Image (cartoon, helix red, strand yellow):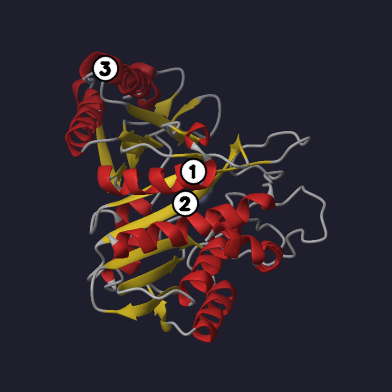
Amino acid sequence: MLKQANAISEELIEWRRDFHMHPETGFDVYRTAGIVADELEKMGYRVKRGVGKSGVVADIGEGGRMVAIRADMDALPLQELNESEFKSQNDGKMHACGHDSHTAMALGAAHLLAKEKFTGRVRFLFQPSEESADEEGKSGAVRMSEDGAMNGVDYVIAQHVDPGQPVGTIAISSGAASGGVDSWFGVIQGKGGHGAYPHHTVDPFYLLAHIIFALNAFISRKLDPFSPAVVSIGSINGGFTENVIPDSIKITGTLRFTTAEVQKQIHAEIKRAFDIAKTLGGDYELKIEIGAPPMTNDKKVTEMIESVGKDFLGAENVHEIHKSLGAEDFGSFMEHAPGAMYMLGTRKQGHEEYPFHHPKFDIDERAFPLGTAILAETALRFLKQ
Ligand SMILES: [Zn+2]
Ligand SMILES: [Zn+2]
């Protein structure tokens, strides 16, 4: 499989560079999805367009088990600062998370699998909007699942490029691999007035100071230290000028967790922190918007990817995943079937290392055949076992 993937490495690079030049964000990935769907039809797949608004679902094979391979297609609202002949042509948009590569490699895997004989089915899930949610707080994976994309799927796999790891390595571990994410939006209500007469007001800044303290303290005082969690404030907006105490202040933030139990606990503690506003004579509004669930890699699927990785790369090049509470909406697909995501080493040699979402984010395209082969081979082994 690796040999066949090597043989199409030029096509993989061509696809990736084309997607890189024409980045699209959120659910607005119609050009990318159109190309993906056309290519899959040419390969002989049964293709459904417009799944989860702008996603593509493509099936091949009959009967038996069904393995799904997922790729995300969306870019970021970011101005690219790299100089290359395939630099982003869309001002203010850039593939700075490697989803251009994910899409190209999944197309490559589709190409390889279309030439194989197997019992069972492979489904490709090309999703929009991994990086952001729509006005109802739903990301691409959620929308596609709602449209039935996961119906009948027995296992689901995905990969993500990793600029922190050299080409020729992968990382994967079972269990929680990334955090669940929710967003919270608060309004702290006081009573405004003249800055010289605070005793005639309920100063929302005074309330806020206590709330911020409580928000930053409960992780260490109330949660189990072996259950990772984060609460961060992202914005505070309020006030007009130096001598006016405003009526209210807006505050927003994010929270991260790896279990539903901790998620519930954090929600309760955030509310408790805001309750301080009442204790001190004010009031508040608080809205917590549910985001993506944590991404928990299934043990069996993880072992399958590990064994493929070891066969292709040698055991010394298959590492443990560096866990983080960054969010990944692949977790939403994994709520419907056991699955796992692995990280594919794509560090560029002799090149400064830039993190995900950086305007100079870049990857080493020599990793493409490997990522393509691992996806295809893992799917085949699940069908053949
Ligand atoms: Zn990203
Ligand atoms: Zn990403």
Instruction: Name the one closer to the observer, 101 or 345.
Output: 345
Position of 304 relative to 70 (above/below): above
Which residue type does callout 2 highlight?
Answer: Gln
Instruction: Name the one closer to the observer, 257 or 214.
Output: 257
| Alpha carbon distance from label 2 to label 1 | 6 Å
**Label 3: how many residues lie within 10 Å, few (<14), some (14-19) or many (20+)?**
few
Residue that protrudes farthest toward the top in the picture: 221
Q: Find residue 225 and name its label.
A: 3
**Residue 187 appears anywhere in the view:** no
The answer to which of marks 1 and 3 sits earlier in the sequence is 3
SS at circle 2: strand
Residue 196, horizontal then vertical, whole percent: 46, 17
The answer to which of marks 2 and 3 sits earlier in the sequence is 2
Position of 95 relative to 45 (above/below): above
Position of 264 relative to 108 (above/below): above
Label 2, on which residue?
A: 159
Residue 176, horizontal then vertical, whole percent: 31, 37
Label 1, on which residue?
A: 343
Of badges 2 and 3, nearer the viewer stands 2
Residue 307, horizontal then vertical, whole percent: 39, 45
Instruction: Name the one closer to the observer, 7 or 364.
Output: 7
Q: How many marks?
A: 3
**Label 2: how many residues lie within 10 Å, few (<14), some (14-19) or many (20+)?**
many
Answer left or right for 6 relative to 314: right
SS at circle 1: strand
Residue drawn at point x = 37 percent, y = 53 percent: 330
Of badges 1 and 3, nearer the viewer stands 1
Quadrant of the rendered image containing residue 127: bottom left
| Alpha carbon distance from label 2 to label 3 | 30 Å
The answer to which of marks 2 and 1 sits earlier in the sequence is 2
Asked if the residue at tag 1 contacts the one at tag 2, i.e. Cβ–Cβ closer than 8 Å, the answer is: yes
